[in-house]
Image (cartoon, helix red, strand yellow):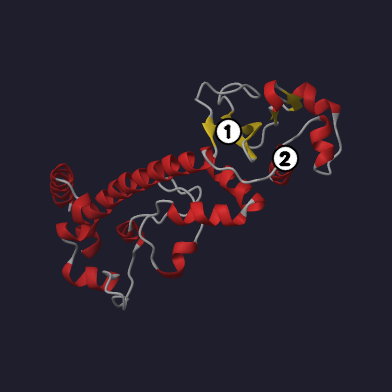
């Protein structure tokens, strides 16, 4: 059967997709980190802080005290008692920080400081411990560069567009390239999973190859996949793994 012949390649496609998407995600994170670190958006810290709090409030993260009031929510004193949420506190040299409460196992530490012709605001995501509710995980907190970029979109749209234009992306494919893949196991928002991955979902279809020349399902069914279809990502190590999987599948059928 065609699907039996495709199975080894489907497994490898998943592995290749993971490798390719991880590289793109890492390159994007490094690029965004550099660009956001040196960005001066020309807005005061007060303006940026107001917008950053609004972003967190819009996403449902509990804010304490004056921060809750600033985003149009009631200031519930129990929030500061039973959650890690803490209202804005002033630090050295005009800096400030706040903590949010939990939403689906995640909370944020927000920090900001003035500098140059603008300011710098950082969103740090902190995961909840899986075994003890309300406690921070031992997992290293993660800087949320995508939220920081969203803040720049609101404060300085032109700068955000410039940064986004230079950010690494996987190869785009028509209108689908605008889809939000946030949450896909191997991809970050704005990335496209490797094209071969969708083959694993094919069952009893009758399609023709696309006009853009990409391999379609019907084309695959006629000739089967070949190693060269995967390009340079199909390393000698993966070729050996494919041969082993193919042999195992053949033995079972």
Q: Secondary structure at mark 1?
A: strand
Instruction: Report x, y in % for residue 13.
Output: 28, 52
Visible in this render: residue 146? yes
- Closer-to-camera residue (150/78): 150
Q: Which mark is residue 207?
A: none
Instruction: Report x, y in % for residue 55.
Output: 69, 45
Quarter of the image for residue 148 reads top right
Residues under numbered marks 1 and 2 in contact, where contact means CB atoms less than 8 Å apart:
no
Instruction: Report x, y in % for residue 100.
Output: 70, 31
* Label 1, label 2: how far apart the Cα atoms are: 14 Å
Quarter of the image for residue 74 reads top right
> How many residues crowd mark 2 within 10 Å: few (<14), some (14–19), many (20+)?
many
- Mark 1 vs mark 2: in front: 2
Q: Which mark is residue 125?
A: 1
Of the numbered discs 1 and 2, the one sitting upstream in the chain is: 2
Residue displayed at 78% across by 24% down: 80
Query: Is residue 73 depicted above or below 210 in this figure?
Result: above
- Closer-to-camera residue (135/163): 163
Tell me: 140 left or right of 204.
right
Query: Is residue 173 depicted above or below 116 in this figure?
Result: below
Quarter of the image for residue 30 reads top left
The residue beneath circle 2 is 53
Residue displayed at 33% across by 55% down: 194
Instruction: Report x, y in % for residue 139.
Output: 50, 25
Tell me: 41 left or right of 179.
right
Quadrant placement of the N terminus: bottom left
> How many residues crowd mark 1 within 10 Å: few (<14), some (14–19), many (20+)?
some
- Closer-to-camera residue (102/160): 160
Residue displayed at 79% across by 35% down: 67
Residue displayed at 19% across by 62% down: 225
């Amino acid at each position: 059967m065609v699907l039996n012949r495709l199975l080894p390649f489907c497994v490898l496609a998943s592995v290749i997709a993971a490798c390719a998407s991880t590289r793109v995600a890492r390159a994007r994170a490094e690029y965004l980190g550099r660009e956001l670190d040196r960005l001066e958006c020309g807005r005061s810290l007060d303006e940026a802080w107001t917008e950053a709090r609004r972003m967190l409030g819009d996403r449902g993260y509990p804010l304490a005290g004056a921060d809750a009031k600033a985003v149009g929510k009631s200031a519930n004193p129990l929030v500061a008692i039973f959650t890690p949420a803490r209202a804005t506190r002033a630090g050295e040299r005009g800096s400030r920080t706040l903590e949010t409460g939990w939403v689906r196992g995640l909370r944020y530490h927000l920090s900001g400081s003035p500098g140059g012709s603008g300011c710098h605001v950082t969103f740090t995501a902190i995961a909840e411990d899986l075994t003890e509710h309300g406690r921070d995980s031992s997992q290293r907190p993660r800087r949320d560069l995508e939220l920081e970029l969203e803040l720049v979109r609101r404060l300085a749209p032109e700068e955000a567009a410039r940064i986004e234009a230079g950010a690494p992306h996987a190869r785009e494919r028509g209108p689908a390239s605008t889809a939000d893949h946030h949450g896909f196991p191997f991809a970050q928002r704005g990335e496209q999973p490797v094209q071969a991955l969708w083959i694993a979902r094919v069952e009893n279809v009758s399609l023709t190859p696309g006009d853009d020349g990409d391999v379609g399902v019907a084309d695959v069914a006629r000739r089967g996949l070949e190693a060269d279809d995967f390009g340079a990502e199909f390393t000698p190590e993966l070729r050996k793994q494919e041969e082993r999987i193919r042999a195992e599948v053949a033995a079972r059928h």
